[in-house]
Amino acid sequence: MAQSYTAKDITVLEGLEPVRKRPGMYIGGVGSPGLHHLVWEILDNAVDEAMNGHASHVRVTLHADGSSVTVSDDGRGVPVDRHPTNGASALEVIFTTLHAGGKFENRTYRTAGGLHGVGASVVNALSQELVAISRRDGFLWQQTFRRGKPVAPLRRLRPARGSGTTIRFHPDPRIFPRTAFDAGLVRERLEVASYVHGGVEFVFEDETAGAREVFRHDEGLTDYLARIVAEREAAPVHDAAFLLAREHAESGSRFGVVLQWTESTDEHVRSYVNGIPTGSGGTHEAGVRAGLGKAMRNFIDTHGLTPKGVTLTADDIREGLTGVISIFVPEPQFQGQTKDRLNNPELTQALDAAVRPALEHWLNHNPSVAEAIVARIVLAARARAASRAAQESVTRKSAASRRLNLPGKLSDCTGSAREETELFIVEGDSAGGSAKQGRDRTRQAILPLRGKVLNVESAPVSKVLANKELSDVVTALGCGFGKSFDLGRLRYDRVIILADADSDGHHIATLLLTFFYRFLPALVTNGKVFLAQPPLYRVDIGKETHWAVDDAHRDRLLAQARSANGRGARPQITRFKGLGEMMPRVLWETTLNPATRRLLRVAIEDGLKTDRVIADLMGRDASARFRFIMERADDALDLDV
Ligand code: TSJ
């Protein structure tokens, strides 16, 4: 469609002062992205000319001065005819008028990055100097601008063959704090352009480094995909890639999709919008995925290719998929923190609707390829099922090994049956040591408590769980905690608190009882909790040894001895400072041995009342704690278990 361009197509809108006043409004900022935006803007014009079939070469030169760049193409040359009313050339209008209308605004593919209508005039406005050259109509035409203003009218220079446009500009240091271009960034952009605009030759000249590179890929996206697959060292599952390219003239959009399945376990799809990478994907990627998924499923289903017992997920279908999606749309909308996600909603449906039948058609016409891809997908599904099974078996194992996760300081009993087993929770390491040596190891376990036991009465659950001593108790018991409590998982028949017979010991016992009552009440109501009764005194009368659990008990023993043998041998009384002082044998005889010991079973008579009593005692009055353990425990007890 041969269209001719004349100056009358251009509508004059505005001067360039606003651009210099607020550059950020037009290029996003004056930092590096803004600076490079100038290059992309000019480059886009040349690429457009190439995409419209009028140019085949685009060249970008970073000059040795480090802060000027030239972009040129071998297209038709920017029009130079005079505007009928104001007498200015078309070229001058293009460079001096903001939002110049006419053909230029209808340029099919506007630059991305969320900035619209940014044109050559913006670049000109922000350039210290810009020189525009158009070769056209047998001559070379040139005009120079400073900060957006023409230095002189367009001049016709010497006669010249061929046609094309060459623009050199120096970003204005009054606008940009840094005017040096990033060669790597420009190079990358040109390389991608050479893939998404297959057949166009892009030359990158970096005079600052004395380097020159030519990028040209006649097969465009297909070449790009081959390179990605090779770089990733992913063996392709099939030879020829699936390629779909479409152009929609009315909406001014076009897209290319190229896909290939590989043996890699990842999915690797790159997408671009107007030649800009969309690293976070977006609506275009979603559309391709949807269409692809439906096409594969439909193909697999209609040919009955799913083996029995295998379910295919979307992830299975895309495992090993490598692809490139490139779309060009007039008004891209970007989203996200880094603006690298496309958000035009209409594109999902459009791409889905295009990819699905095309891919199905391709599969149906390439049966051996289709077979290889389906085999790959089934393999992915099987591998996933196998890995899930392995995962589950690991989880089961870890449930079984929970026994191995018992607290390190627990000396567990060695017997395998739970009947008649006991867990002694012992205050202090040395007492724990004596108990460990003195116990019946086949059925008695010892858990020494070292640190402070938290008063749980007013503590939040999180704090209770964070308390090492209490969490060790819960772990050793194995029956869970709070809502997840399960008496069936209790690892022992009885839980016995073994504390010193002094007031500190009572305090510890009280704290533990409070904890049980608050967080494992079923343990108490089921009669699983006991208090051991270690002796406070050893009373030796002649050859006999007696143990007294408290002062009254001692006095009774002494009275018995006096009445039994009159003057007799003088009784020897030893007061134990703590359990740790007791010989293991003694501890066994007096406290651990089920045949001779006395235990107090803890019971709850009245839940509500106990609740209040515990709250009262543990919440406030320290002296009452002692009473509680002595009185309550005593009251509520069956003795001699
Ligand atoms: F942006 C720019 F103006 F600075 C610029 C434009 C920069 C560069 C590097 C290239 C171009 C450019 C513009 N290359 N080719 C063109 N083509 C036209 O402007 C053009 C030529 C002829 C006709 C026609 O209808 O005859 C129409 C157009 C748009």
Image (spheres, helix red, strand yellow):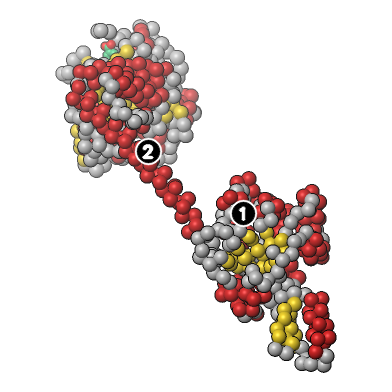
Question: At label 1, which amino acid type do we have?
Answer: Leu
Q: Quadrant of ligand 1?
A: top left
Q: Is residue 70 above or below residue 366?
A: below
Question: At label 2, which amino acid type do we have?
Answer: Thr
Q: Is residue 390 above or below residue 253?
A: below
Is residue 502 visible from the viewing direction of this image?
yes
Residue 10 position within the rendered picture, expressed as x and y whole percent measured from the top left: 38, 11
Instruction: Tell me how far mark 2 sits from mark 1, CA to CA.
Output: 59 Å
Q: Secondary structure at mark 2?
A: loop
Which quadrant holds the C terminus? Answer: bottom right
Residue 435 position within the rendered picture, expressed as x and y whole percent measured from the top left: 60, 72
Residue matched to label 2: 179
Residue at x 73% of width, y 72% of height:
501
Residue matched to label 1: 465
Residue 583 position within the rendered picture, expressed as x and y whole percent measured from the top left: 62, 80
Residue at x 50% of width, y 60% of height:
416
Is residue 203 visible from the viewing direction of this image?
no
Quadrant of residue 351 within the rendered picture: top left
Mark 2 and mark 1 lie on one chain; the one further toward the N terminus is 2
Number of the label disc, if any, that sits on residue 109 = none
Q: Is residue 576 above or below residue 170?
A: below
